[in-house]
Amino acid sequence: MALELADPRDQEFLLFEVFDAASVASSEKFAAFNEKTSKMLLKEARNLAVKEILPTNKLADVENGHPDGIKLENGKVSVPPSYKEPYKKYIEGGWLAMSDEEEWGGQGMPHLLAMACGELFTGANCAFLMYPGLTHGAGNIIKEFGTDKQKATYLKNVFTGKWGGTMCLTEANAGSDVGALETVAKLNDDGTYSISGNKIFISGGDSDLVENIVHPVLARIEGAPAGTKGISLFLVPKIRVNEDGSLGEPNDVETVGIEEKMGIHGNATCSLAFGSKGNCIGELIGEPNKGMKYMFLMMNEARQGVALQGLGFQSASYANAVNYAKERIQGPNLLEAFNPDPVKVPIIQHPDVRRQLLLMKSYVDGCRFLNYYLARCFDLATLAETPEEKDKWMGLIELLTPIAKAYSTDKAVEVASSGVQIYGGYGFIEEYPQAQHYRDAKITCIYEGTNGIQSMDLLGRKLGMKKGKPLMDLMGEVMATIEKAKNAGLTDIADKLQAALNKVGDCAMHMGKTAMSEKIMDAFGTATIFLEICGDLCMAWGLAERAAIAQQKLESAKKKDAPFYEGQVTTAKFFFDMLLPTAMGRMDSVKNTSAAVMAMPEAAFASK
Ligand SMILES: Cc1cc2nc3c(=O)[nH]c(=O)nc-3n(C[C@H](O)[C@H](O)[C@H](O)COP(=O)(O)OP(=O)(O)OC[C@H]3O[C@@H](n4cnc5c(N)ncnc54)[C@H](O)[C@@H]3O)c2cc1C
């Protein structure tokens, strides 16, 4: 049977054999989510993803006659028509707010289970999932920082997907440097604010999927300090909401353009003009000038969402590649080279194709481990009994978020590229699914803080936070896996993981010191490679953990389960034999912290 999206056996392995989801279900909070219910929900999510959402992925790439699958007519955006029905089913199923409280329309699920369901949805069609995904992000802002009145007005409508939501940060001259934004907010007599300014690249900035859209907008109150210190956060509805909660007058928010993009054509990337007629009303969220602080708090979720998108692309591309490699007949098996009339075989028998499949599987499995681990940290933080315990899990989330975001998305492009390669010429042809994954995946390295910005966050903020405790905690987690691998008899893997851990530890010390010395620019010139080796270590850790558990299960495994467990051990061996050595070389390059990056004269980058 063909594999579709994430491997269901592997999802269950991670949930119930690696991360012991059952222990979370033994708490009062998550008691409804025992193994049986969780498996049922995962199956429901898969059905919706495969049967309803996946078929729209290719369709929406070109629907509506616009190269971006989106139509803008008379200031109104129409999304690909094929999205309407799946969106209805998605929100009716309560999938938009899987882990949120029931009082606001959520399902109250553990984050780990929600992560597994989310991988299926976003893997089926990332551009589609961005509508409810951003809506959830906007809802979370209201939940965390909104007043009771704001919650009562907006939250349930947003978490049930009746209304949509966005994130409005970017402006033409304020991308990575959000503090440069020019959108202005002027206090009115009634306590509301008049907003004026232009935002660009706003995902789901308008759509006809929902009755109303709530825009969290970053703007500067007149007279506020320059830079990030003077930024406030506002709720700006597309249609104003009356006191009784009914919809009132349209607000002065206009979609003035939609972008034609390289990928994610099914998502409306809008230029929005706020207050071009002088009549855009917004409400302040929280306190003035604390907008960036609030946004930072929300960024973990948004960045984890993008990391999950990276994983979704990887698993979808891998599933296609495996299916194709089993079906595509091309050439004889190498061992039949001297046979004058050899049988032609499926390409999965060719060593180089198997190498690529294993490379893809290593990253898919490793990134799935990393992303699910993060979700598990959330659950453990939620259930923590002491502040110290909660701090530990929250610290790990902070540390691992930039790594998960940048590494999962960079690897998404690499994995999707291998996915194209395995299809040969057909990979380059749009009739087949791989080209779209490759095009679509690239944006995940750019938005929600480019991957370069993630590496700066890791080096500049996360590495030394809380006197390095999160890093020490991470090392402790890896050490525990090393012990497990030893106990399972996987000594080679245990030794290599120990060597990688030691090297990354040395690199972290070195980078921390260099970033605080006169060589700070050299350190930041190496930050991306440092993040990459941290990601490599996480892959090694995850694959070793999987292998150690699988190795022990193999002894008593039923015949039907044995190949899965063997596959876990073999994938780890492949990674440790063939991919980790190059990562160890990169670790050496981090310790070199080359001065060449900054020594290069600007005039020498090109002779003209
Ligand atoms: C399809 C799409 C959807 C988007 N959706 C949204 C959305 O919903 N909401 C929203 O607000 N924004 C959105 N964005 C905007 C996105 O977040 C920005 O494009 C991104 O943050 C980068 O900003 P920029 O394009 O201005 O690039 P720049 O900031 O100009 O960056 C250009 C390059 O310089 C590097 N760079 C910049 N500053 C530094 C620095 N200090 N140190 C090191 N390197 C640096 C960057 O890493 C990048 O490689 C979207 C963009 C796209 C294309």
Image (cartoon, rainbow, N blue to C red):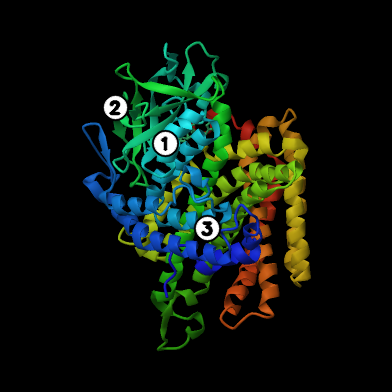
Q: The residue under label 3 is which amino acid type? A: Ala
Q: Which residue is mark 2?
A: 250
Q: The residue under label 1 is which amino acid type? A: Thr
In front: label 3 or label 2 = 2
Q: Secondary structure at mark 1?
A: loop
**In the picture, which quadrant includes the N terminus?**
bottom left
- In the displayed structure, 583 sits above or below 35; it is above
Judge from the rendering whether residue 52 lies leftward or rightward of residue 307; answer left or right. left
Q: Tell me if mark 3 has few (under 14), some (14-19) or many (20+) residues whose alpha carbon lies within 10 angstroms of its own.
A: many
Judge from the rendering whether residue 99 lies leftward or rightward of residue 164; answer left or right. right
In front: label 2 or label 1 = 2
Q: Which residue is mark 1?
A: 166
- In the displayed structure, 58 sits above or below 424; it is above
Residue 455, position as x, y percentages in the image: 61, 40
Q: Is mark 2 within 8 Å of ligand 1?
A: no
Q: Is mark 1 within 8 Å of ligand 1?
A: yes
